[in-house]
Image (cartoon, helix red, strand yellow):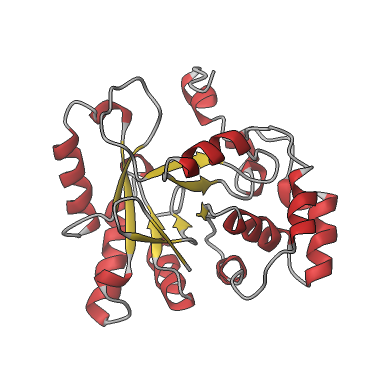
């Protein structure tokens, strides 16, 4: 399943985030993900693993496992590189062993004047942090929303993300999951997709990679979408800027 961007290109609505992945595991993770059906990979210079991702992609392309035109590869401009965007992009391309990126994002919303309408706005959004007004604003202006941390930070790393809530342990999500014979994570991801947002969960475990991708063969009823809307806690779990830098960039 893909979504059309305002520049005419199409983006897979399910992707795999590679932040925090161990370098010695990336090759197997990327290979397994491609075999499962993932075609969208969300990378960044700041993840410090573009070279390893590049090696995995190069091997997959060389072996014929996938074609470059079938992939959608994202990378991101780090905060300190705003003065030399072209050079930073070329560095990411070199490490990823690619001739082009499908999407290049500004990683964090630091004060910078931009005059080009973005095709994508990647934000944290999940059932506990739904951000309905921002999602609607972006969609009204034909800006695709990509949901990073779509399962909430506690599902990934509570120490880093500072989360006290675990989205996928929510009683309502568990109830809906039982109704459809799915996992709470699958319900949260399907909810995101039915909001017309792209979701990029992260996992290094084969079982989770498979489970997360199995969300295209069912659809949530509107009554269940409405129920999930009611569990919004307006709770941001990605507090990395506060934890690492001591600065609340979202204030």
**Rendered residue at 40%/62% (across/down):** 40
Residue 18 location in percent, x, y? 43, 53
Residue 13 placement, left or right of 93: right
Q: Quadrant of residue 162?
A: top right
> Which residue is at the far bottom?
64
Residue 8 location in percent, x, y? 30, 57
Query: In front here: 184 or 155?
Result: 184
* Placement of the C terminus among the 4 image quadrants: top right
Q: Is residue 6 visible?
A: yes
**Rendered residue at 29%/66% (across/down):** 57
Residue 176 in the image: above or below residue 246: below
Q: Is residue 24 visible?
A: no
**Rendered residue at 23%/47% (across/down):** 92
Residue 156 location in percent, x, y? 60, 48
Query: In front here: 103 or 211?
Result: 103
Disc count in the image? Answer: 0
Residue 178 location in percent, x, y? 83, 67
Query: In front here: 235 or 92?
Result: 235
Residue 231 in the image: above or below residue 54: above
Residue 138 placement, left or right of 64: right
> Which residue is at the far front?
140
Q: Quadrant of residue 45?
A: top left
């Amino acid at each position: 399943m893909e979504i059309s961007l305002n520049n005419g290109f199409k983006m897979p609505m399910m992707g795999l985030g590679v932040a925090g992945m161990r370098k010695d595991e990336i090759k197997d993770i990327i290979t397994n993900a491609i075999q499962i059906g993932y075609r969208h990979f969300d990378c960044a210079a700041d993840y410090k693993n573009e070279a390893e991702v590049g090696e995995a992609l190069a091997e997959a392309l060389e072996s014929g496992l996938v074609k470059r035109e079938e992939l959608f590869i994202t990378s991101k401009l780090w905060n300190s590189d705003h003065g030399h965007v072209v050079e930073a992009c070329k560095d990411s391309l070199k490490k990823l062993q690619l001739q082009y990126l499908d999407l290049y994002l500004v990683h964090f919303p630091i004060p910078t004047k931009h005059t080009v309408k973005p095709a994508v706005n990647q934000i944290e959004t999940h059932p506990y942090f739904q951000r309905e007004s921002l999602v609607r604003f972006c969609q009204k202006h034909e800006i695709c929303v990509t949901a990073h941390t779509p399962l909430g930070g506690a599902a990934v790393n509570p120490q880093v993300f500072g989360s006290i809530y675990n989205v996928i342990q929510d009683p309502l999500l568990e109830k809906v999951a039982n109704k459809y014979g799915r996992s709470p994570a699958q319900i949260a991801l399907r909810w995101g997709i039915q909001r017309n947002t792209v979701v990029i969960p992260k996992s290094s475990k084969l079982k989770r990679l498979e489970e997360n991708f199995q969300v295209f063969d069912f659809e949530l009823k509107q009554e269940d979408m409405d129920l999930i809307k009611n569990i919004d806690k307006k709770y941001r779990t990605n507090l990395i800027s506060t934890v690492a830098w001591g600065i609340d960039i979202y204030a």
